[in-house]
Amino acid sequence: MAVTVEVLEPTRALALKVWWAFLWRAVLGALAAGMLAGVLIGLVTSAVGMSDPSALSGVVSLLGLLIGVGVSAEVMYRVLKKKFKGFAIALVRTP
């Protein structure tokens, strides 16, 4: 059974809907994950008696970057699967 689909031309309005669906989820997810990581790092550094937690700034910055990349990749995956009003995003194989 063949399925017919209507291919929509990209418009700025559709792009804005997809962008917004990605942006707010990525920002909130990254904030939540970053706050959780910050609390955990704070608890660990105080538990081990670290007198200068700023010594970990390089490691914490890298961890923040990795968290941001991970969260945004997961959000992109979910947005790609999302059904919007009147359209969905489809990945089409090209020759």
Image (spheres, grey):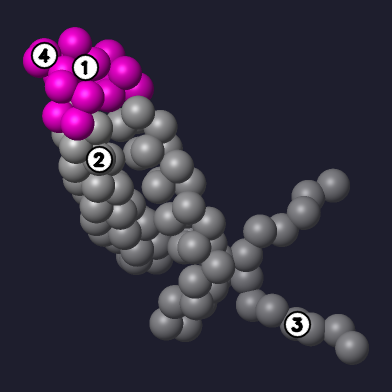
Labelled pair 2, 3 in contact (Cβ < 8 Å): no
Mark 2 to mark 4 CA distance (whole Å)? 16 Å
Q: In this rendering, would 83 be left or right of 60?
A: right
Residue ID for mark 1: 57
Q: Quadrant of the N terminus?
A: bottom right
Residue 73, x across and y down, in percent: 48, 46
Q: Which segment is the magenta one?
A: 46-62
Instruction: Give residue 46's quadrant in the image.
Output: top left
| Residue 52: assigned label | 4
Instruction: Report the amino acid beneath label 4.
Output: Asp
Residue ID for mark 3: 4
Q: Secondary structure at mark 4?
A: loop
Residue 92 vs 67, above or below: the answer is below
Mark 2 to mark 3 CA distance (whole Å)? 51 Å
Instruction: Report the amino acid beneath label 1.
Output: Ser
Residue ID for mark 2: 40
**Residue in the image at 86% along x and 84% along y:** 2
> Foreground: 9 or 70?
70
Instruction: Give residue 22's quadrant in the image.
Output: bottom left
Q: Residues within 10 Å of mark 3 (few under 14, many from 20)?
A: few
Mark 1 to mark 4 CA distance (whole Å)? 10 Å
